[in-house]
Image (cartoon, helix red, strand yellow):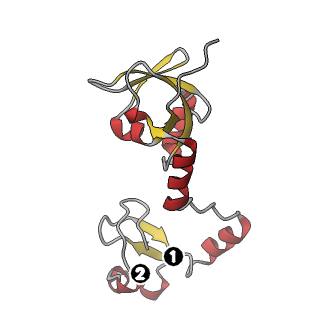
Amino acid sequence: MRCQLCGYEFEITSLACHANCPLGSHCHLICCPHCGYQAVDESKSRLAGWIGRILPARAQPENARARARKVVEEKLVPLSHIPDGAQVEVCSLDEMPARRLARLSVFGLLPGSWVTLVQRYPAPVLRIGETELALSTDILDQIWVRPETAPTP
């Protein structure tokens, strides 16, 4: 299993927390041995199984090979590789957490929008319409753009 918080991979069968848990065999939590994050063991919890049957399953993320093929075919590059002053079209926001996607979409940073990289240092600044937004370089690496200039109006 992979921890949803820290990404640490571990075997559920080798967990020591169930031996020390006061609930013992009735415990329906899986504790990450690295960070202590607790997740519900869906195989033991009736409520988790019931919710899993009612709600549709989440779409599985695209595998890395297919994603790499898509990037090569569409000639996409990360926004961090674009020179200052270039206006580009956002094509994909790759592997970004849902909360971050929601926050960026409020500012208009969505696939299909045109952005201008105003400056790179001391902090990367994007112009989206009339909005200027400072982001970290890590976030710029997750924004894939087509490195062509915008059409003239």
In front of the other: label 1 or label 2? 2
Residue 12 circle label:
2
- The local crowd at label 2, few if under 14, some if 14 to 19, many if 20 or more residues have their Cα within 10 Å, is some
- Considering only vertical position in the picture, is 113 above or below 102? above
- Secondary element type, mark 2: helix
- Considering only vertical position in the picture, is 80 above or below 97? above
Q: Where is the N terminus found, in terms of image quarters?
A: bottom left
Residue drawn where x is 32% and y is 83% of the image: 16
- Secondary element type, mark 1: loop
Nearest to N terminus: mark 1 or mark 2: 2
Q: Which of 16 and 123 is in front in this view?
A: 123
Q: Where is the C terminus found, in terms of image quarters?
A: top right
Picture quarter containing residue 66?
bottom right
Picture quarter containing residue 7?
bottom left
C-alpha span from label 1 to label 2: 9 Å
- Considering only vertical position in the picture, is 38 above or below 149? below
Q: Mark 1 points at which residue?
A: 41
Q: Are marks 1 and 2 in contact (CB under 8 Å)?
A: yes
- The local crowd at label 1, few if under 14, some if 14 to 19, many if 20 or more residues have their Cα within 10 Å, is some
Residue drawn where x is 38% and y is 25% of the image: 83
Residue extending furthest toward the left: 122
Residue drawn where x is 31% and y is 64% of the image: 35
- Is residue 31 shown left or right of residue 44? left
